[in-house]
Image (tube, rainbow, N blue to C red):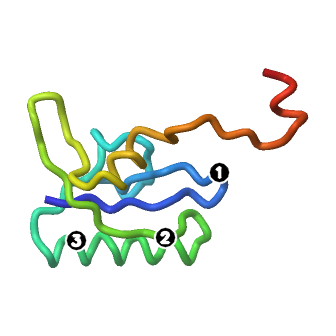
Amino acid sequence: MQVVSASRLTDGSVVYLDSRGDWIESLACARIFDSEPDVQAGLEQAKAAIAASKIIDAFAVPVAQSADGLHAISLRNAIRELGPTVAFKTSPAAAARR
């Protein structure tokens, strides 16, 4: 069981391909691919989105379904799913506004 993930080009957010072909931030709503040919079809959709400058760095992510929802299996992708582990300071001016 896998989903297709990428980074949105406009803001760098982690996104997932959904069943409508849209790129969404919720892993819970991502399209699940159960076979290798389906994963390859999802990656082909990602290539079109890359060519359209919507996303970058698309790849398949192994996931598992549990009682509390869909989760990435690897630590790297679990961290991507949950967001940064530290606060990110973009500039001294942005930090001053906090």
Instruction: Determine the residue positioned at 55% across, 49% down.
Output: 13
Real-space Cα distance between discs 2 and 1?
13 Å
Residue 76, by quadrant, is: bottom left
Which residue is denoted by mark 2 in the rendering? 57
Q: Is residue 24 above or below residue 32?
A: above
Q: Circle 2 sits in a helix, a strand or a loop, which is it?
A: strand
Q: Is residue 44 above or below residue 16?
A: below
Q: Residues within 10 Å of mark 3 (few under 14, many from 20)?
A: many
> In which quadrant of the rendered image does the C terminus lie?
top right
Earlier-in-chain disc, 3 versus 1: 1
Q: Secondary structure at mark 3?
A: helix
The residue at which mark 3 appears reads as: 39
Q: Tell me which residue sits at (65%, 51%) in the image.
A: 11
Q: Badges 2 and 3: C-beta atoms under 8 Å apart?
A: no
Locate residue 31, reporting x and y percent: 25, 53
- How far apart marks 3 and 1 lie (CA) works out to 25 Å
What label sits on residue 11 in the rendered view?
1
Confirm or deny contact between disc 3 and disc 1 (CB under 8 A). no
Q: Nearer the viewer, residue 64 or 38?
A: 64
The numbered mark, 2 or 3, whose residue comes first in the sequence reads 3
Q: Secondary structure at mark 1?
A: loop
Which mark sits nearer the N-terminus, 2 or 1?
A: 1
